[in-house]
Image (cartoon, rainbow, N blue to C red):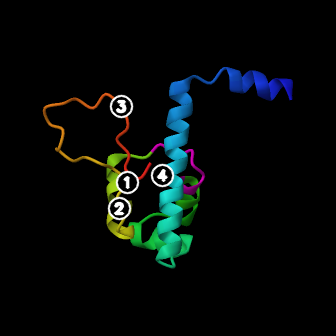
Amino acid sequence: MALLDNLLAEITPEQQARTDRKMRIACIIDDAMKAKGLGKKQFADKVGRKPSEITKWLSGTHNFTIETLSDIERVLGVRILNLSNSNKSKPNTSGNILANL
């Protein structure tokens, strides 16, 4: 247990925040797949990927590209990125670009 405690103590708040966001993205995808009745194979076919890649996405550790997130949003009909221009004059200092988080 001491080894695990030491490893966890070395994680910076920024690293933890990134991990949390990746896990939330995986949950959004998983929930949307279930809501649409899609298994990994069906979803993979719709986004032009292999089922093994979907498994990686759902692990919560995948580093997504904007293109991939856009494809996922289109196929599942969910919003993952919040890119609205409503705060054009005010910079986003929260660092949170993910919707539904």
Which sits in the foreground, 47 or 9?
A: 9
Q: Within 10 Å of the Cα at label 3, are there few (<14), some (14-19), or many (20+) other Cα atoms? A: few
Q: Earlier in the sequence, mark 2 or mark 3?
A: 2
Residue 51: which quarter of the image? Answer: bottom right
The residue identified by callout 2 is 73
Q: Main secondary structure of the magenta part?
A: loop
Instruction: Compute the Cα span from label 2 to label 1.
Output: 7 Å
Expressed as whole percent of the image width and height from the top left, the position of residue 100 reads 41, 53
Which sits in the foreground, 36 or 88?
A: 88
Residue at 14%, 36% in the rendered image: 88
Contact check, label 3 and label 4, Cβ < 8 Å: no
Element carrying mark 1: loop
Q: Within 10 Å of the Cα at label 4, are there few (<14), some (14-19), or many (20+) other Cα atoms? A: many
The amino acid beneath tag 4 is Ile
Identify the magenta region. 57-63
The residue identified by callout 4 is 25
Q: Earlier in the sequence, mark 4 or mark 1?
A: 4
Expressed as whole percent of the image width and height from the top left, the position of residue 6 reads 76, 21
The residue identified by callout 1 is 80
Decide: is 49 above or below 99. below
The amino acid beneath tag 3 is Ser
Q: Nearer the viewer, mark 3 or mark 4?
A: 3
Element carrying mark 4: helix
The residue identified by callout 3 is 94
